[in-house]
Image (tube, helix red, strand yellow):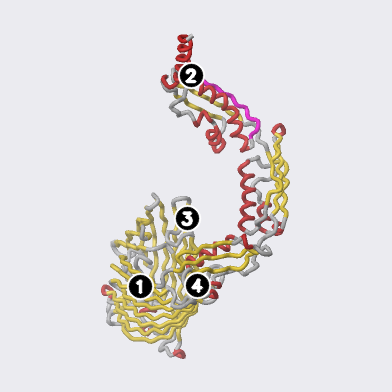
């Protein structure tokens, strides 16, 4: 009995291990008759496709996987509305260890949506956002029954309910009744939004001294753009969180809705704030072809008091400009945008190559307010005392009281590297002898920059700058109010501030009353960090519009560096004899 039993055991063991001893089987899978996402889903669900590279394949396993293929292909086609496909299969052994599995799929007629029973119940019935989702539900009568579109429609309803405070929303009925023989399907979807919840009390909790926290609660409350009892919205919460984070007052901002404390369908909000350090020190070093080597030092007191007042002092030094500035800022109605600001500054500019020198002392006050649609309005008044020397032929001293008003707007998907965005500025200022100024002058400045993406890797940048001055005697106009152009931010191919009216006796550029600059650029990205561009610039500073505009054109490289976008351009002065060229280097954001 022992020897036969041992022989049987050895035979069973050999039979079990034989696939591992045998040479590895290789497998090739071909599917035709379907394409695109349908084919991708077939490959995804087809077990024989997923396991064809398994090193432990053997004949019995290949045949088992092949037998399962028809059911798997049918399952893969149903989400796309094909319920009655005709599938022919073939499994052949091409060589001793190589197999070919072939599947030809005829999807047949797709199932189409015959009826849609889509009902909206609850308080959200009158909500325009829900009504739009119902009207534009991804599947409509007559459409091919694509399950993913149906799932997207259900998901959109649930997400909208969650984001807008319909905490009790639920699907009362959701089913698809498919009639394959008739190539038809009925959709039943009943969605009850329930009641909409509201914002309750907003509580600010600041780390630090509990008896006297860093910020006054009344000041923090001005960041909140909604009132207690306003319909709940996660978007409003995110906006509030971003406003507090962007204010530069706090290191961390944590929003905590409190559903455990709901009363009368109102959700209280706890906001935990960790203030930043009171003082901030900054230092910077850079280079630009307009300014040469430049550096900066700065200090800021982020909270002079509990009402969010700020004090900032900064020094900027370069080969051509030196600025010393101090600003005191008082947040007003909406701390995100509205403020009163007092400024004192000393500005010195010395362009030795242009024989330009000016020194200005400035005192100013301004009030900035948000005017809707992203527009900021700033009303200001500046007193500036200036001495200037333009080549020895235009020199003087002036003391002007300059009131003005400006409107600005910046909209961008990313301020550092913008794919789509725009920047607009309108500035109007002037003075009159009744204000104690020696001259009567009015000046308008318009600036715009527009950036739009082109397909995946391109973008177009259009830039414009225009200025107009009304004054009887140009010689009485201080250098800071005259227009000059040329340089890496205006007409490339020309030196910084090298374009403008020239004094005939000294051949020195003395600046003009009008300004007009335009630029067009196309940029193409080759990698995530590197791109190149071509551009054309045109413009000049003039005293009347009959004077010719200068033209420049060139090519450039851009690099998204860790410290910001770096632009290196080579530009030719097309309006000058011989078309001389210049390098232009700029480091900084797009908008």
| Residue range (magenta) | 82-92
Foreground residue, 128 or 521? 128
Q: Distance between the Cα atoms at labels 4 and 2? A: 80 Å
Residue that carries the numbered disc 4 in the rendered image: 210
Q: Is the stretch drawn in magenta largely helix, strand or loop?
A: strand
Which residue is farthest front?
A: 1
> Which x, y percent locates residue 320?
29, 73
Q: Earlier in the sequence, mark 1 or mark 2?
A: 2
Q: Earlier in the sequence, mark 1 or mark 3?
A: 1
Name which of mark 4 and mark 3 comes first in the sequence.
Answer: 4
Q: Which residue is mark 3?
A: 453
Task: For the residues labelled 4 and 3, say whether their Cβ atoms are less than 8 Å apart.
Answer: no
Q: Are marks 4 and 2 in contact (CB under 8 Å)?
A: no
Image quadrant in which you'd find residue 363:
bottom left
Q: Earlier in the sequence, mark 4 or mark 1?
A: 4
**Can residue 579 be seen here?**
no
Q: Position of residue 387 (x, y in %)?
A: 33, 84
Specify the label residue 298 is tagged with: 1
Q: Nearer the viewer, mark 4 or mark 3?
A: 4
Q: Secondary structure at mark 3?
A: strand
Please determine whether, in this image, residue 394 is positioned above or below residue 6. Answer: below
Circle on res. 93: 2
CB atoms of marks 1 and 3 within 8 Å? no
- Is residue 428 placed above or below 589 in the rendered structure? below
């Amino acid at each position: 009995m022992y020897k036969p039993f041992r022989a049987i055991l050895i035979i069973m063991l050999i039979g079990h291990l034989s696939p591992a001893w045998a040479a590895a089987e290789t497998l090739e899978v071909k599917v035709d008759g379907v394409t695109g996402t349908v084919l991708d889903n077939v490959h995804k669900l087809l077990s024989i496709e997923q396991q064809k590279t398994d090193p432990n394949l053997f004949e019995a396993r290949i045949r088992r996987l092949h037998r399962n293929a028809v059911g798997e292909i049918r399952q893969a086609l149903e989400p796309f509305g094909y319920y009655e496909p005709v599938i022919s299969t073939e499994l052949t052994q091409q060589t001793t260890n190589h197999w070919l599995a072939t599947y030809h799929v005829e999807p047949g007629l797709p199932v189409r949506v015959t009826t849609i029973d889509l009902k909206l119940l609850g308080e959200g019935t009158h909500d325009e956002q829900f009504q739009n989702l119902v009207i534009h539900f991804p599947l409509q009568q007559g459409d091919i029954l694509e399950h993913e579109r149906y799932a997207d429609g259900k998901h959109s309803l649930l997400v909208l309910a969650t984001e807008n405070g319909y905490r009790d929303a639920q699907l009362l009925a959701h089913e698809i009744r498919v009639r394959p023989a008739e190539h038809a399907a009925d959709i039943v979807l009943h969605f009850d939004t329930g009641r909409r919840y509201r914002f309750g009390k907003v509580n600010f909790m600041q780390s630090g001294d509990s008896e006297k926290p860093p910020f006054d609660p009344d000041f923090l409350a001005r960041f909140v753009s909604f009132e207690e009892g306003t319909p709940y919205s996660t978007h409003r919460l995110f906006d509030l969180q971003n406003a507090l984070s962007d204010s530069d007052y706090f290191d961390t901002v944590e929003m905590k809705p409190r559903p455990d404390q709901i009363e009368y369908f109102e959700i209280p909000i706890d906001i935990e704030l960790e203030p930043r350090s009171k003082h901030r020190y900054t230092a910077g070093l850079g280079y630009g072809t307009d300014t040469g080597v430049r550096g900066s030092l700065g200090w800021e007191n982020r909270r002079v008091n509990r009402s969010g007042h700020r004090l900032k002092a900064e020094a900027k030094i370069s080969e051509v400009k030196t600025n010393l500035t101090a600003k005191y800022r008082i947040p007003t109605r909406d701390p995100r945008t509205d403020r009163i600001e007092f400024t004192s500054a000393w500005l010195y500019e010395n362009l030795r190559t242009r024989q330009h020198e000016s020194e200005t002392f400035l005192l100013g006050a301004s009030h900035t307010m948000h005017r809707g649609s992203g527009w900021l309005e700033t009303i200001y008044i500046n007193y500036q005392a200036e001495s200037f020397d333009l080549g020895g032929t235009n020199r003087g001293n002036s003391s002007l009281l300059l009131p003005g008003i400006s409107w600005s707007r910046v909209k961008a998907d990313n301020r550092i590297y913008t794919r789509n965005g725009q920047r607009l500025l309108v500035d109007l200022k002037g003075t009159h002898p009744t204000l104690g100024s020696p001259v009567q002058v009015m000046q308008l400045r318009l600036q715009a920059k527009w950036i739009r993406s082109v397909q995946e890797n391109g973008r177009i940048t259009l830039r414009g700058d225009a200025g107009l001055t009304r004054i009887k005697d140009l010689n009485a106009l201080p250098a800071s109010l005259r227009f000059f152009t040329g340089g890496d931010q205006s007409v490339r191919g020309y030196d910084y501030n090298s374009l403008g009216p020239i004094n005939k006796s000294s051949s020195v550029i003395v600046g003009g009353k009008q300004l007009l600059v335009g630029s067009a650029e196309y940029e193409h990205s080759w990698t995530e960090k590197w791109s190149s561009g071509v551009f054309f610039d045109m413009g000049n500073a003039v005293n009347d519009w009959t004077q010719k505009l200068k033209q420049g054109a060139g090519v450039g490289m851009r690099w998204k560096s860790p410290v910001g976008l770096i632009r290196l351009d080579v530009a030719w002065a097309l309006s000058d004899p011989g078309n001389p060229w210049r390098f232009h280097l700029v480091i900084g954001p797009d908008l």
